[in-house]
Image (spheres, helix red, strand yellow):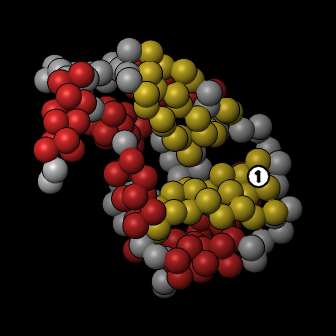
């Protein structure tokens, strides 16, 4: 490494010292994620996303009941390192058609032999968001093939549209590395 580059790194390092008592964006993100996942009323029919910028957490996504958005924001506000919560979580409209579509798609996805492993555990990783007959698949799968299979399974039903927002574990890993 050249002497100039080493000097530049030292100057940059000294110009913006990291305080040991301030958690990193990644640490805050992990704690926020844990709070959402451990919320007792968070289901596969809800999707919540968080972005963190120096302690300011912006929550987005969609939930099936109004109290969920409020409760999740309160839980996140208690996380160490969170200075402000911007709650942009939307509440899905009440609809018997949407409820039935959610259940039918969830059963089909989690009963599919290629996808059943995603239903194991307390927090299944494929979320089915239905809004006025439009379906969005959200969450994490192991690979592109599983993402494709999940979309094909969901498309078998009389949804007006199916949007596939599933990410692979590799894509999520790359996003987390940017934090």
Q: Position of residue 1 (x, y in %)?
A: 14, 53
Q: Residue at x 86, y 62 (%)?
A: 160
Q: Secondary structure at mark 1?
A: helix
Q: Point out residue 99 in the picture as x, y percentages from the top left corner.
A: 71, 51
Measuring 46% from the left and 67% from the top, which residue is drawn there? 168
10 up-or-down from 175: above or below: above
The number of callouts visible is 1
- Is 79 on the left or on the right of 19, as rendered? right
Note whether residue 68 is visible. Answer: no
Left or right, 42 with respect to 54, comes to: right
Which of 21/35 is in front?
21
The residue at the point 18 percent across, 24 percent down is: 14
Question: Residue 169 lies in what quarter of the image?
Answer: bottom left
Left or right of 136 in this view: 177? left
Instruction: Decide which of 125, 99 is in the foreground and name it.
Output: 125
Image quadrant assignment for residue 25: top left
Vertical placement of 72 versus 101: above or below?
A: above
Residue 102: x, y in percent?
Answer: 67, 58
Residue located 38% across and 15% down the image: 83
Q: Is residue 131 visible?
A: yes
Q: Residues within 10 Å of mark 1 (few under 14, many from 20)?
A: many
Relative image position of residue 141 (x, y in whole percent): 46, 68
Q: Which residue is mark 1?
A: 98
């Amino acid at each position: 490494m050249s002497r100039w580059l080493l000097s530049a790194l030292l100057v940059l390092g000294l110009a913006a010292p990291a305080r040991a008592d301030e958690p990193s964006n990644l640490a805050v993100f992990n704690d926020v994620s844990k709070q959402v996942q451990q919320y007792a009323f968070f289901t596969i029919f809800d999707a919540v996303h968080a972005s963190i910028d120096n302690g300011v957490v912006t929550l987005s996504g969609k939930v099936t009941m109004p109290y969920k958005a409020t409760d999740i924001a309160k839980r996140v506000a208690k996380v160490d390192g969170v200075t402000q919560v911007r709650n942009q979580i939307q509440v899905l409209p009440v609809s018997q058609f949407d409820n039935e579509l959610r259940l039918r798609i969830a059963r089909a996805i989690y009963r599919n032999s290629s996808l059943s492993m995603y239903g194991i555990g307390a927090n299944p990783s494929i979320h089915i968001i239905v809004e006025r007959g439009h379906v969005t698949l959200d969450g994490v799968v192991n690979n592109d093939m599983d993402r494709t299979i999940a979309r094909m399974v969901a498309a078998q039903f009389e949804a007006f549209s199916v949007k596939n927002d599933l990410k692979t574990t590799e894509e999520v890993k790359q996003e987390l590395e940017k934090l």
